Image (cartoon, rainbow, N blue to C red):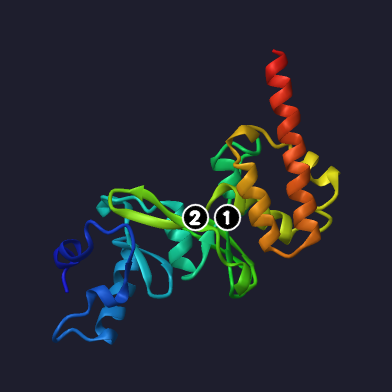
Amino acid sequence: MKRADLLRAVGREPLFSTGLLLSPGVGLRDVRKQLSRWTADGTVVQVRRGLYALGEPYRTAEPHPYEVSNALVPGSYVSLETVLADHGLIPEAVFATTAVTTGRPGARTTPFGTFVYQHLKADLFWGYRTQAVGGNRIAFVAVLEKALLDLSYLRGRSGEPAFARALRLQRLDSLDLERLATMAQRFSSRKVERFAGNVSSLARIEAEEYQDL
């Protein structure tokens, strides 16, 4: 396969797998050898084994961090601090894309950033949706309320009022407090339910402060 053939095959793809380059008469071994050469000369960038992006000079679609996160660990969804920061709920900048998975926790550093995964039990793996990330591309991302509750579930002592205050939550009017309470009950965790109640109290205080302005 020549470089021109590669660009015709995956030129519009932000990410592509080895399998996309297989064709009659072209075996997996040959594709892997060619990808190794292209990685060495910068034609392609390896994201993980079997997952690639075109090198910067040839790339027409920049991979979105959310779709990279999903592709690195299939069956994961973006959640936690990344979603909270993107919605403006927390003031701090987030320098890694955070996600949850029913598999092993861990972190991966790639040419497109750092991606952190935390383990969540299978019966808590809900509360996410597809989100457009450019063109016809989508990624699996937690709804805002679930991202907040995932954080509570995975952190120690989050049921204490001090934990919610320490998050320095803002724009609490963007939360659906009824959905937050309903979702918290599904966790069957007193800690998470207390956290949801504490957040609701902060939201009411914030609303009263705005009314007084």
Secondary structure found at label 1:
loop
Tell me which numbered mark, 1 or 2, is placed earlier along the sequence.
Answer: 1
Q: Nearer the viewer, residue 35 or 65?
A: 65
Say whether residue 57 is left or right of residue 107: left
What residue is at 73 percent from the left and 32 percent from the top? Answer: 204
Disc marking residue 141: 2
Q: Residue 85 lies in what quarter of the image?
A: top right
For label 2, the crowd category at 10 Å Cα-Cα, with few meaning under 14, some 14 to 19 and many 20 or more, is many
Q: Nearer the viewer, residue 192 or 82?
A: 192
The three-letter amino acid code for the residue at tag 1 is: Ser
What residue is pinned by disc 1?
A: 79
Instruction: Indicate the position of residue 38 as horizontal and vertical percent values.
Output: 29, 68
In the image, residue 10 sits, relative to residue 34, either above or below, namely: above
Instruction: Indicate the position of residue 55 as horizontal and vertical percent values.
Output: 32, 57
Disc marking residue 24: none
In the image, residue 50 sits, relative to residue 201, either above or below, namely: below
What residue is at 34 percent from the left and 62 percent from the top? Answer: 15
Say whether residue 30 is left or right of residue 116: left
Instruction: Indicate the position of residue 9 as horizontal and vertical percent values.
Output: 18, 66
What residue is at 76 percent from the left and 29 percent from the top? Answer: 205
For label 1, the crowd category at 10 Å Cα-Cα, with few meaning under 14, some 14 to 19 and many 20 or more, is many
Q: CA distance from mark 1 to mark 2?
A: 6 Å
> Can see residue 167?
no
Q: Are marks 1 and 2 in contact (CB under 8 Å)?
A: yes
Q: Residue 27 lies in what quarter of the image?
A: bottom left
Say whether residue 26 is left or right of residue 78: left
Q: Residue 165 lies in what quarter of the image?
A: top right
